[in-house]
Image: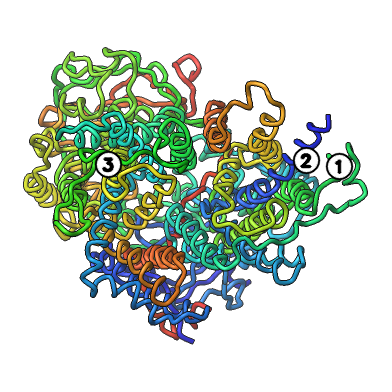
């Protein structure tokens, strides 16, 4: 039997970067094939070419043995390629049914479509109400729409792009069941991820990309996580240097019954959250995306201002009614999840971006006038200390790669030596080298006596980095406990909304 | 076949940022020449009279000055507001209300003399413009009502205020029935600064206003606030700049300056309120602000360019019979071409090599 | 009674151009594009319609040419905002400035020259003292009402309408599924331009039988405001447009009715539609779900990563 999909010498050049450099591999019928690599390794570009969103500059795609040109996604679907995107291609204001109809190339009467949807859902145990508006659905349910939409076309190859980054461990297990069933029926699956344990648990073959080049095609069951990680990252992994058995100082940040008001229609507010972070401590906040993390960060940073002065205190001083500027003066710095447009202004120079958050703590403003010399000097220091690859303080933030911009932003806040630092997704979309540097800087800041809160969806990151851990679900935060006391299963249950030991037993 | 594609630049191009307005003006001349030739005028003469005669004929320079002054003052205010992404489209209305407020002072002090009358009129003008701009500001910040529509609707309404006042309460008793206010007293008229010309005090004021605005926008936290709110409102909030406060400031500055321009215009060239007072300076200043790249120094140049087209349009009307309305077309073309050229600031055009496009086909 | 009938007939006449222009803009906005050049496109449609009617005497040809003029202008807008990703707000303003200038130039030699108004479709019923409320209008009034239904059906019931809504809701997703965002938006913008052109042509063809500079007097902007007022729904637009027609013709009613209303200065009446627009925008903003129905991509340029 010919290979379901075979790539030979696929090459794609973007301005300044070779995204794919002569990549060749094959996927057999019924095979679950992992495409493994770091952010920026070229995985997404590769699947976009398979799905016809982009065209390769060179190379050949063969489908069931025949060479093909995939001109657009419609052509891909016609061949039998289905795709579930990492960032869902859904329309929030439309219903499930309308969303699925949009993904179908043939015009199917909505009644017939609905019955086919119900049939697919029954076969694979995916439950959904076709008439609900997408905006009201959870992330896991939204993914189900994408999967149902792809399955309705009876695909011979299903591409899953980072499907588990938004799921709880339990939801991941359910997804794997569906995927195994599909593979058993002969559908090939191209599974894109950088999560090694998932790949070991699910996949038959793994193709590893690094810097746009194919490094290896191997059997993940024969490899250790470490050996695959080294192939993925290249040089030996750097571990976080963290002094063992450190004692924490007095409480720095005390949050007491903090709640926020829902701002948008579909936002999740923070609901009666309390925790304490001591000097030298790193508290991790785990949770599935969209469970109030953004509101928690905004409420701590001062972008959302509550009505209780004492709900947030630093060294016993109530800052609950202060705005971001005043809180920074009190020693609380924050880094939101979104880099471009929130933590930094893409059109501004790095120097001007330093003025954004460091102007008061570092005296960059005198009598309403901006001291651009001071901003430049400080920016230069951030660039040097955090090894930011940039043309200098005058480079625009938008010209930096994601990882470098994140290093700059983290550096900008950390070098202000805040008493309390709150960061969200500190290494989202950042390559391993930069992530290690950011983690080390956070550990060092804590060692110097600051209290740190890290909000992240990456459990591996939190378990490696944090001293204590709490889980946020629907705006509520579980009690914080030493990170070593948690098992992955327990975190998973908390992420899924199961609180308290009684229910877990 | 040769094909082109757009490719994002790593950094926005400074050359294109300042080069495209110049290119837009030049292209406007070329396209305008073709367009007016096509519809039966002497296109080359039209371009020559509109763009060059005002510069080469020294008698026209004073006209340039007094046309450019209100455009620069209003354009400066709009450049501040648009920087902050506050779309005040109603500068014309604020200009009118400012002029009416100044007129009210002139009429109240009619027959009096004193150095304080003009400054008082200026304050009234600015206050009038600010007050009128505060309506959209209030509605935007409190109720999230689109400021484009409200400020524009208020402009249409403001014209009716003029008509009402000069037909009724302010009607000139000596006006033999004409709907107009009385001629201002000497103390309420702007002094000429160059004897023997019509150049009034408003001209140097315009330049000073733009220079101050340039300093404030580039060197102070106020300017930083405007720029950051416009470029990334979310980041501005994170940086501690309230969006609502910024909207208020942007509206008040642009409204106040439009009101000041209204005062200078009514106390300078008009010296009384007449039905023909609204001359669309408030709308033309939108083009000035964009052509000047929302930079007050650029606004000075752009104000002069637009003034040239106004003066040149009148020249062309008398010399080659080109209708006055042609000026508006030249101005709109300039704005179109400028907006079209904007893409070159962030993108560059690359030729796709035939091999690569063949591979992609 | 006769007066009421007369008023109602005037209301429908005055509302029709606003309704047609607003329906076009509604479709444009549903596709995620904000075209603020409606006023300019209307003026171009008005002068094109006038000139064609003046020279040919054919009303339908005049309407079609009005539509073509509006559509041509909308292509300039489309090219700048869709092909070159220019700022939609600024480009819309430029289009209005251009339309104002161009129509003034083109119409300069036609001022004070009369044309004939379109006659009612049902001449017999139009003469009836009561039934003329329903049957006393020329073609555009019925066209507008038909388009309300047609656009509602298109958006709600057809696949093309679903795709248009999807593009306005999330352009990047629509692109990744394989729909051509730019093509859909071009078509929507062109439709909006044609509708604005027809709306503009209604002024010389159904309201005042001559050309006057700037004769649409801000009605294009009111149409834009009405789309917001109607929460992007066609049937609410119908009600909103007739409400505005009422506001605009109230002066007649007040003057004819005598009493205290007739003492109100005419300048206030003239300003009333604009003030009413602001009031309406304020009222709609007070509603809880005011902005939730707005297309999520409205006014944002489409920038795919490749």
User: Is the residue at mark 3 from the same chain as the one at mark 1?
Assistant: no
For residue A213, which numbered disc appears in the image?
none
Kindly check if marks 2 and 1 are in contact, taking CB atoms under 8 A apart as contact.
Answer: yes
Q: Foreground: A53 or B108?
A: B108
Report which quarter residue B23 is drawn in. Answer: bottom left
Kindly identify which residue carries mark 3: B260
Q: CA distance from mark 3 to mark 1?
A: 53 Å
Marks 2 & 1 on one chain: yes
Q: Residue furthest right?
A: C124
| Chain bearing mark 2 | C
Q: Residue, x 52% and y 55% (percent of image)?
A: C37
Q: Which residue is mark 2?
A: C9
> Which type of secondary structure does the marked residue at label 3 adopt?
helix
- Which quadrant is the N terminus of chain A positioned in? bottom right
Asked where in the image residue B319 lies, by quadrant, the reply is bottom left
In the rendered image, is residue B75 in sight?
A: yes
Viewer-closest of A56 and C227: C227
Q: Position of residue B194 (x, y in %)?
A: 14, 56
Provide residue A204's location: percent of width, then percent of height.
Answer: 50, 56
Locate residue A202 relative to residue A274 in the image: left or right. right
| Chain holding disc 1 | C
């Amino acid at each position: 039997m010919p290979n379901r999909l075979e790539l030979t010498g696929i090459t794609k050049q973007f301005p300044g970067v070779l995204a794919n450099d002569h990549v060749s591999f094959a996927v057999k019928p019924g095979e679950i094939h992992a495409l493994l690599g770091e952010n920026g390794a070229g995985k997404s570009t590769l699947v976009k070419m398979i799905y016809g969103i982009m065209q390769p500059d060179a190379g050949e795609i063969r489908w069931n043995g025949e060479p093909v040109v995939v001109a657009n996604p419609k052509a891909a679907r016609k061949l039998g390629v289905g795709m579930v995107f990492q960032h869902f291609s859904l329309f929030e204001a439309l219903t499930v049914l309308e969303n699925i109809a949009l993904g179908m190339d043939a015009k199917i009467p909505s009644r017939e479509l609905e019955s086919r949807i119900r049939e697919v859902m029954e076969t694979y145990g995916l439950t959904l109400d076709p008439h609900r508006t997408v905006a009201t659905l959870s992330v896991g349910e939204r993914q189900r729409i994408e999967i149902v939409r792809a399955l309705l076309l009876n695909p011979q190859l299903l591409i899953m792009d980072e499907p588990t980054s938004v799921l709880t461990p339990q939801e991941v297990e359910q997804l794997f069941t569906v995927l195994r069933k599909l593979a058993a029926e002969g559908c090939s699956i191209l599974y894109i991820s950088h999560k090694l344990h998932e790949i070991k648990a699910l996949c038959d073959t793994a193709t590893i990309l690094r810097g746009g080049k194919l490094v290896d095609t191997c059997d993940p069951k024969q490899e250790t996580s470490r050996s695959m990680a080294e192939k993925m990252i290249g040089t030996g992994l750097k571990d976080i240097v963290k002094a063992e058995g450190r004692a924490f100082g007095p409480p720095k940040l005390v949050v007491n019954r903090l709640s926020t008001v829902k701002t948008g229609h579909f936002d999740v507010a923070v609901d009666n959250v309390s925790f304490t972070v001591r000097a030298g401590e790193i508290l991790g906040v785990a949770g599935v995306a969209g469970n109030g993390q953004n509101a928690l960060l905004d409420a701590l940073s001062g972008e959302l201002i509550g009505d209780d002065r004492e709900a947030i205190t630093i060294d016993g001083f109530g800052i609950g009614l202060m705005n971001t500027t005043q809180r920074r003066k009190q020693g609380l710095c924050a880094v939101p999840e979104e880099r471009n447009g929130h933590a930094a202004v893409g059109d501004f120079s790095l120097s001007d971006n330093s003025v954004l958050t460091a102007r008061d703590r570092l005296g960059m403003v005198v009598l309403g006038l901006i001291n651009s010399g001071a901003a430049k000097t400080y920016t230069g220091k951030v660039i040097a200390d955090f090894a930011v690859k940039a043309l200098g303080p005058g480079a625009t933030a938008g010209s930096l790669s994601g990882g470098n911009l994140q290093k700059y932003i983290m550096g900008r806040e950390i070098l202000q030596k805040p008493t309390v630092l709150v960061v969200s997704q500190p290494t989202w979309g950042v390559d391993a080298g930069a992530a290690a540097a950011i983690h080390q800087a956070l550990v060092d800041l804590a060692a110097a006596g600051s209290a740190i809160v890290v909000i992240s969806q990456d459990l591996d990151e939190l378990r490696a980095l944090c001293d204590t851990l709490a889980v946020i679900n629907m705006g509520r935060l579980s009690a914080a406990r030493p990170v070593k006391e948690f098992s992955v299963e327990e975190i998973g249950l908390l992420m899924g909304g199961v609180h308290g030991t009684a229910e877990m037993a | 076949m040769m094909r082109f594609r757009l490719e994002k630049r790593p950094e926005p191009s400074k050359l294109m940022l300042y080069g495209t307005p110049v290119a837009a003006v030049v292209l406007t001349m070329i396209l305008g020449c073709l367009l007016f030739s096509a519809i039966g005028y002497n296109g080359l003469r039209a371009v020559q009279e509109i763009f060059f005669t005002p510069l080469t004929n020294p008698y026209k320079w004073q006209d340039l000055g007094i046309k450019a002054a209100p455009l620069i003052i209003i354009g400066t205010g709009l450049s501040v507001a648009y920087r902050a992404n506050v779309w005040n489209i109603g500068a014309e209305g604020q200009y009118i209300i400012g002029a009416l407020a100044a007129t009210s002072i002139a009429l109240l002090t009619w027959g009096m003399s004193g150095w304080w009358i003009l400054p008082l009129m200026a304050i009234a003008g600015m206050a009038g413009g600010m007050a009128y701009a505060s309506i959209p500001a209030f509605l935007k910040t409190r109720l999230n009502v689109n400021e484009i529509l409200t400020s524009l609707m208020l402009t249409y309404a403001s014209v009716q205020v003029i008509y009402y006042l000069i037909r009724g309460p302010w009607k000139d008793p000596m006006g033999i029935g004409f709907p107009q206010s009385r001629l201002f007293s000497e103390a309420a008229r702007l002094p000429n600064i160059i004897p023997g010309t019509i150049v009034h005090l408003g001209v140097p004021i315009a330049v000073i206003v733009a220079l101050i605005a340039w300093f404030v926008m580039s060197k102070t936290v106020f300017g930083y606030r405007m720029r950051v709110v416009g470029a990334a409102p979310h980041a501005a909030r994170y940086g501690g700049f309230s969006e609502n406060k910024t909207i208020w400031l942007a509206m008040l500055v642009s409204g106040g300056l439009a009101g000041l321009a209204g005062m200078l215009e009514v106390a300078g060239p008009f010296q009384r309120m007449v039905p023909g007072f609204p001359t669309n300076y408030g709308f033309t200043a939108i083009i000035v602000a964009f052509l000047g790249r929302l930079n007050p120094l650029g606004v000075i140049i752009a104000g002069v360019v637009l003034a040239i087209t106004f003066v040149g349009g009148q020249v062309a009307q008398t010399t080659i019979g080109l209708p006055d309305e042609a000026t508006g077309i030249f101005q709109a073309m300039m704005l179109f071409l400028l907006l079209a050229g904007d893409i070159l600031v962030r993108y560059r055009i690359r030729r796709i090599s035939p091999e690569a496009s063949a591979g992609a086909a | 009674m006769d007066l009421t009938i007369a008023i109602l007939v005037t209301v429908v006449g005055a509302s029709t151009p606003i309704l047609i222009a607003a329906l076009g803009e509604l479709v444009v906005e549903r596709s995620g594009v904000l075209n603020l050049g409606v006023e300019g496109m209307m003026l171009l449609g008005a002068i094109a319609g006038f000139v064609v009617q003046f020279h040919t005497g054919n009303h339908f040809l005049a309407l079609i040419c009005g539509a073509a003029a509006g559509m041509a202008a909308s292509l300039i807008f489309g090219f700048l905002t869709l092909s070159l990703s220019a700022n939609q707000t600024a480009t819309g303003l430029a289009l209005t400035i251009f339309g104002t200038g161009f129509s003034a130039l083109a119409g300069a030699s036609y001022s004070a020259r009369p044309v004939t108004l379109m006659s009612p479709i049902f001449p017999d019923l139009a003469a009836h003292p009561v039934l003329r409320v329903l049957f006393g209008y020329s073609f555009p009034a019925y066209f507008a009402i038909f388009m309300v239904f047609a656009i509602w059906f298109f958006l709600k019931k057809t696949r093309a309408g679903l795709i248009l809504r999807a593009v306005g809701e999330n352009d990047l997703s629509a692109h990744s599924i394989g729909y051509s965002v730019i093509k859909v938006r071009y078509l929507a913008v062109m439709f909006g331009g044609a509708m604005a052109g027809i709306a503009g042509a209604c002024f010389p063809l159904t309201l005042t039988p001559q050309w006057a500079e700037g004769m649409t007097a801000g009605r294009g902007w009111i149409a834009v405001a009405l789309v917001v007022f109607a929460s992007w729904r066609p049937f609410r637009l119908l009600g909103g447009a007739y409400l505005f027609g009422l506001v605009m013709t109230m002066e007649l009613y007040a003057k004819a009715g005598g009493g205290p209303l007739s003492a109100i200065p005419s300048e206030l009446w003239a300003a009333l539609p604009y003030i009413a627009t602001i009031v309406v925008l304020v009222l709609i903003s007070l509603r809880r779900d005011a902005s939730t129905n707005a297309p999520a991509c409205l006014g944002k340029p489409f920038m795919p990563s490749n």
